Image (tube, rainbow, N blue to C red):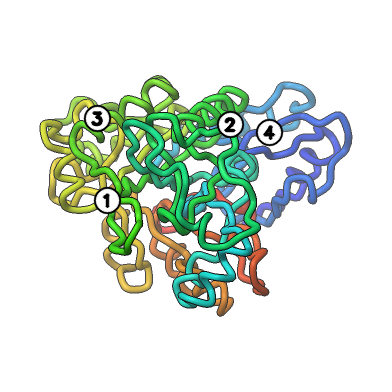
Amino acid sequence: MNRDLSYIGQSFDETNRYVLVNTKISRLERPITHQDYKIKITKLKTMKEIIILLASFLLIGTVEAQGTKARKGKSGSKVEKEAGQLRLNQIQVIGSHNSYKQAIDPALFKMLKQTSGSMADGIEYSHISILEQLNRGLANLEIDVYADAKGGKYAHPKGLDWVKNQAKYDPEKQMMEPGFKIFHIQEIDFRSHYLTFKSCLQDLKKWSEEHPDHTPVFITMNAKDDEIKREGFTVPEKFTSEVLDALDQVILDELGKENLITPDQVRGSYSTLEEAVLNQNWPTLQKAKGKFVFVLDEKDEKIATYTQGHPSLKGRVLFANAEPGTPEAAILIMNNPDKDQAKIQELVKKGYIIRTRADSDTKQARKNDKSQFEAACTSGAQIITTDYYEKSTHFGSDYQVSFEGNPYFRLNPILKK
């Protein structure tokens, strides 16, 4: 039997004046319209779908008490309770790729376009601020970090000297400070909403404290140390075991362990992290609210370095992109949902969390091709990243990524019962 839940939308809009902010309901002092929260209320068929809807609205089923008598009966309480018991691997979210990235200065980009056309096309994108992304409800961020133990290593990118009349860069001299820096490509694509990882973490903590019931936020990280073999280009510091230890420590220092979901917490009493994952030991959304999940998006040598001396990632802060069948396997990076759809589905059903991509290098956006995004959705990968949660501001395209209903958060489609 179909259940017409249009009254839910009515009670949110006209009676209770609630608006969705990063999957948390906040009260307004005026009636609101669908434009305020951009959620499509549809006819739902099963109690499970009602639970899904409320989970995406409320995350943990907590609603402010005023004016909610219509939803406070026994059945409403049951739905809210069940929504909170969904586990972290039972959702699917959309987040951003290279979330920190600002546009390359137009003068420099014009030069890059003339000298390296296809490369320039691939990096012709940018993002609104990270906090704006979170306020919209995006539930994954991607941050690239470069080690800079003494400070000043990346303080004057060469690109500033190649073309005149560029906007000022780092007037506050943050790049002179010791510690991890955030940007995309040395010398070329260096403008970022945050120049230091420390300042980014401080703002994330402040935002989280202001939104204590927020959806758990995944943060995938690239530890960047690849050398670009061109004369004059800065050679990055390598991510040794000591540098990776420092990366863990700055996250702990700035965010606090209490605000993190760590491998130790997921492993619990199981002998390995992978065993815990295969036994569905991910935290519930109730327990995961207000927290961050960090993932090291690397392979081979860096993963081996990060896990050395830390079997099953004991004592580590980040999950690691470890191969299935190893004690550290939990959150995996698989960026080709077209090619790997069946494999992703198999791994998701086993209990792993998968990060994949809807688009890359601006290619899908330029062609307005959503086939990879559709494959990502169907794969069941829990995290889907994109550069286009809004349309490009750099070239004409209607390409934009979102789910039906709640744009960036829903129940995992292949784990529905």
Residue at image x 29%, y 35%? 281
Using a 10 Å C-alpha cutoff, classify the residue at mark 2 as few (fewer than 14 neighbours), some (14 to 19) or many (20 or more).
many
Residue tagged 1 = 298
Decide which of 71, 292 is in the foreground and name it.
292
For numbered disc 1, what is the local secondary structure? loop
Residue tagged 3 = 245
Residue at image x 78%, y 45%? 36
Which one is earlier in the sequence, the residue at label 1 or at label 3?
A: 3
Residue tagged 2 = 61
Whether residue 78 is visible here, answered yes or no, is: no
Q: CA distance from mark 1 to mark 3?
A: 15 Å
Q: CA distance from mark 4 to mark 2?
A: 10 Å
Which one is earlier in the sequence, the residue at label 4 or at label 3?
A: 4
Residue mark closest to the camera, 4 vs 2: 4
Which one is earlier in the sequence, the residue at label 3 or at label 2?
A: 2
Q: Amino acid at mark 4?
A: Ile
Q: CA distance from mark 4 to mark 1?
A: 36 Å
Decide which of 389, 265 is in the foreground and name it.
389
